[in-house]
Image (spheres, coloured by chain):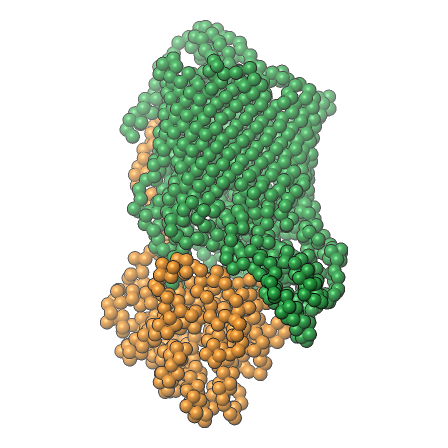
Chain colours: A green, B orange
Amino acid sequence: MRKVLFIIALASFTGLLFAQQFGEIRGTVYDRETNNPLPAASVVIVGTTLGSATDINGNYTIKNVRPGTYKVQARFIGYGSQTKDVTVRSGETVTVDFYLAPSAIQMDEVVVTGTGAAVEKRSVGNTIGTITVKDIEIAPVRSITEVLQGRVSGLVALPSSGQAGSAAAIRLRGLVSVSQSNSPLIYVDGVRVDNAAIDYGAVWTGGQHPSRLNDIIPADIERIEVIKGAAATTLYGTQAANGVIQIFTKKGISGQPTINFMIERGGVRVPKRLYSTGYLIGVFPDGERITLGARRTPDSVKVASEPLANSLLSTGPYEAYFASIRGGTPSVGYYVSGRYESEIGSIVSNWFRRVSFRGNLNAVGGENWDITATAGYTYSRLKRPNNDNNIYGVVPNALLARRNLATATNPYGEPFTPISIARELHNLQTTHAFTGGVTWSHRPFGTFRQKLTIGFDVTAEENEQLFPYGLGFIYYPYGMKGNLRRTFYSLTLDYSLAWYIALSDKFTSSLTAGLQGFADSDYRVFGQGRDFPAPGLSVIGAGAVRTADEYRYRVINGGVFVQEQIGFANTFFVTGALRLDGNSGFGPDYGLALYPKAQASLILSEFGFWPKNFWNSMKLRAAWGQAGLAPGVFDKQRTWDAVAGLDGVPAVTPANIGNSKLKPERSDEIEVGFDAGFFNDRLGIEFTYYRQVTKDALLLKRYPPSEGWLNLQLTNVGEVRNSGIELTIRTLPISTSTVSLDVNLMLSTNDNKVTSLGGTAPLPYGLGGIGEVREGYPINSFWGYRLKGIKEGSLTSALNLLNTYRASASYNFQNPSHRRTVMNAIANAAVEVGTEKEFLGNAYPKLNGSFSATLTLFRRLSIYAFVEWATKFYVYNNTARFMIRYNTYVPEIEAQQKVFMAKDTVELRQALEEWMKYDWRADDLWVQKGDFVRLREVGISYTLPTRFTRFFGSRRVTLTFSASNVKLWTKYGGPDPQVNYAGPGPNLNQGTDFLTLPQASKYFFTLSIEF
Amino acid sequence: MIRKILSLIFLAVLVAFYTGCKQTLEVENPNQITDEDLTQPFAIPAIVTGAAADFAYEYQWTIICSGLLSNELIHIGSFPTFREMHDGQVQDNNITMEDWYGYLQRARWVAESGAERIKQVVGEDSAKKMIEYAMLRIYAGYALIHLADMWNGSPIDGGPLLTRAQIYDRAIAHFTEVINIADGLPAARTFKNGTTQTLNKSQVKAIAYLGRARAKLHKGDLSGAYQDVADPSLFTGLIFYAIYSENTGRENNLVYIYAYDRPEVAVGPRHQITDDPRVPVQPPTAARPYWRQAKYPSRASDIPITKWQEAALIRAEYYLLQGNTASALAEINSIRAAAGLAPLATVDINTLREERKREFFLEGMYLQDLRRFNDPFLQGRMAFFPLGRREKDTNPNLR
């Protein structure tokens, strides 16, 4: 430690030792195809820390260059780099211009995530996914998950519902952990931010819930880097096994200020025609009675459901206004933006509003240091109806309504809460989110750099739930107000140093080391007041019965790392690193965690033998590394909960069993791959194979309930494996000044398997125990009983049974409940369902792909399309199954009808064979293939000719139309396979459709004016 | 100059961070109570109240689940797990049953282990002079009766499968200890059962007799049960309640919530009786097409665990078996009179069963009585709940 401090101190004071007559390099960087200047491109002197960024007109100046001959390189995202030899003489200025060609692959792109310090991609042994502002220019993306989805291979977003404000879960390379969060770490400008997606039990709305990723504004994003697994995330240590996503917001650039205004209008729509033969709303026609032998047509259902569907679902308006200003001088740059956004959901009682501001400032402080300050603030309000697995839900009550059970108070026969009342329920989340950070970069001497980031992320959430007085809500006829407030603070402290030394003219050494500390605090207070004396009250204090709760949590993670990279002739790089971590969640018998990594990269195309004429670049890479996931802070202790008993007397009850040996689970990953560029990098192929083993996997161990402790205890016993390939193909087949075409294809596979449960029993989960974690199967697996078919020799007795029911006065075939009873009895008699649980399928897709193409004509008109698909996965259609149990699923009612009308065993067999397709008892019928292809995004944008833009007094005016979720093709039996009744949070419980609103289609008109 | 200042700041940050790391990564832990915190004399009241609360939590589920399996309650709502119970075919992974079994075992364990903990804290002799210690034995005994009533044998503390008789015997041992120590309890010490009931030592003893009598009766020892309740004067007016409250959600009466507030379960056909105040049920209306219980009309409705009528009905059953119908009739008419009902003229085993059914409406007794009297309703149905998957998967003695 002392040595490190000495070096840093030395580094800090030696900056002024070099002082002599300097020269200067200046020039302009252009796009080779269009001859347009490129702003914000970087120009560096290779092998030094000297460099500069181009200003708004593409000009750069590098001052204070000692006389000598240098290699000067210009590079810009999306373009191939260019290097020129430059000789600088004392006191003179050299002019050097660069002409960069667009390229599909960039070996010299600088990346910072997981590498310790900024390095060129060529020296990195793992794959890094990058998304730049160019990739999302036309795309209809309004959330960070929409930005990421399908744009980085190996990254899968799992959307959960079509409600406005619903979030999607993000998974990198599948599920690493059975019990811990599988969400990647998110950094914004070097500061770790809140990535929680909490479904609060106290103000529960039924499953759908937002994620704090909603607070990140896509319009401010400049670039995103994604590292996917333990081989790349080692330097982030514990908590990083799920990958790291680093978001960089826009920074100031030198030049005249650029002012941008954007106005957006659009709509949000959920399709009404959903359940195969009917509408979303499965009610029976008004007044119709089901009699024996009566035929019902889907049309009659449609007629009845249409008014209700229309009253619940409509096209919700969307509007947004955005303004930004970006500019600066060579020494100070700024970026300031503001945005207002309002989305009205397609379903009633659903809207999302968001106001955000950002101010970024970067300043050169002196010869050798600069400082960047970033600050982003988002204020949002989200109103949503109760949903999914909930008796107050709008969609659940509509789908399970039985018109023939209608009463005066439940006009559609809603089973729990009349829709007219359900829509009065008031769930409102108000959030203030602030992320701010300061980064100080210092180059005290030669090639020594150090960087310190101090950042702060704070979220203040208020979750209100109001059941108005006197509407007859179950449990709360006299009203209830609940309010849960959560305050989250996260402090980031990140220091790193990098020292580059040319050991000889071939060998180079690059030493990096760093310290990181994170302190996360999560404080929640909940209050509830129930039974108001009169209508109109909406505060807790007005309730006659009040309860309160509090939760406090603080966890600290600290670690140090050191990394050494040896390079040979800029073509071969070997890297080794170690990371040492402490975390509040480790058990007292466990100390610190040590994670190693090793990487190599080889630029084959730099060798003489390489066929450079068409295959101009080729890099081989390999990486091995470890990262961890920490258990929760209290999981190690045997604890009791404080409760009350005997009418408000303090009491205790068993909580956590405790495990003093708890340690992080450890992911060990190997990835190998290549990056290849063809035809002057017009075609780029990135291929990666990864294999990841999570050892000491934290499993939720079940103990015998007869021991009295019911909670599951985290135990390091299991093993989980993930493997797969990732392929990214980017091409620029045409790139001229009049026509350019950009085509991308991404494919990724994931094979997930729990290889060991360490002798613990399988862990069932999910609705009706449909999911189970078992040895030898994926984490998210569906298990259940299969339909076997008609029991031989049972038809005669089944027919007799049917005749008994027909003759019985106590069974009324007009009554759906009686029909259900009769149908169940006949099914039990004649149709066999297996009694052994069998594997029915995996919930997480084994194959994901996306394809996008952008065609630009005359640099004015851009047409864009983006298709996404996923295959080899299953969705549990508990919606249809539940509708059958509630007698609202029209195809099953039709099939029932035939069974009830059967006259002999031949007819009964025929009828039962049809009815069996809807046998609600057989799990395998409802675990359905989810394979889909979705035309996820389309866009067309037109930039007005200059003579019109002058009319506005502006530099550039662009009109864009874009739409998302335009069309879906799927094998799934429900309306949309990309849903989940439990929202974006949980590891288990993925892929279940239970009275869930399908994904909404959205369209946007955008007018963008640049001054 | 600026560089110097920055460097100093930077060094300070490093030193602060380094010392920060050297401290253990302590966390704020105000939410949780550690096990050691409870091995203290001042923790005894919280342990006993916890046992009472866990018992009350278990008991409401015993009433709902056994009610469904016996069709004292019928399923009308949305839970598939309730449907299985209603239909008399319960899978061993029925999550409602698995949870309830856990609550029941927890209630038993906290009471039994709480009693042992008191002995550890204050010593065995002092423990036996504490009414709290006696109450823990009583809650343990009733939880064990529920366990033996509902499952045809189950393990205790992760051990091997015990027969029902063994479990009743374990309950009997708890009640016997209370009976033995009751007279030695200090007269001044009482047990405050909720805000309305205060139990003194003779009531505690009577509750123990009632519990032991029920355990013996359910085990098949009617005359042994009679011995425990032979003296009516011990039980005059006694009702021992499980306490529910509006105070927190966990203290709410779930029988009220599922069978009154929310349409999940309704009153079954055999209990749709309108002329008996002991069976407060509401016939269907236009807006509510099912029979609804009104015995527990609020979240704070307490549920009797046992009461003096149980002693009378055990005596009546014993007299009937002895052929002493006159005494049996007197016992039955005494409880009818207490409910404001006209006396019966004759009595037989069916009358007795009918009286038990009404007297113990929604007190978790009906399933056991159907079984005890071989009711044909149970033909082709499960008479017990199956042992849950979770216990079978995790208990090494059951594999």
Decide which of A391, B267 is in the foreground and name it: B267
Residue placed most toward the observer, A433 or A277 = A277
Judged left or right of residue A419, residue A638 is: left
Residue A865 x, y percent position in the rendering? 65, 33
* Residue B320 in view here: yes
Residue sitting at x 56%, y 59%: A833
Q: Residue furthest front?
A: A793
Q: Can you say whether A839 is above or below B66 in the image?
A: above
Q: Nearer the viewer, residue A478 or A942?
A: A942
Residue A68, by quadrant, is: top left
x, y (%) of residue A802? 66, 69
Residue A443 seen in the current view: no
Q: Residue at x 48, y 60 (%)?
A: B93
Q: How many numbered circles does the render carry?
A: 0
Q: Residue at 58% of width from left, 76% of height from top?
A: B269
Task: Tell me which residue sits at (47%, 47%) in the image.
Answer: A777
Which of B95 and A829 lies nearest the eye of the viewer?
A829
Image quadrant occupied by the N terminus of chain A: top left
Where residue A269 appears, x then y in whole percent?
68, 45
Residue A744 x %, y %: 60, 29
| Residue A608 in the image: above or below residue A986 | above
Q: Please determine whether, in this image, residue A553 is positioned above or below residue A768.
A: above
Depicted B164 relative to depicted A248: above or below: below
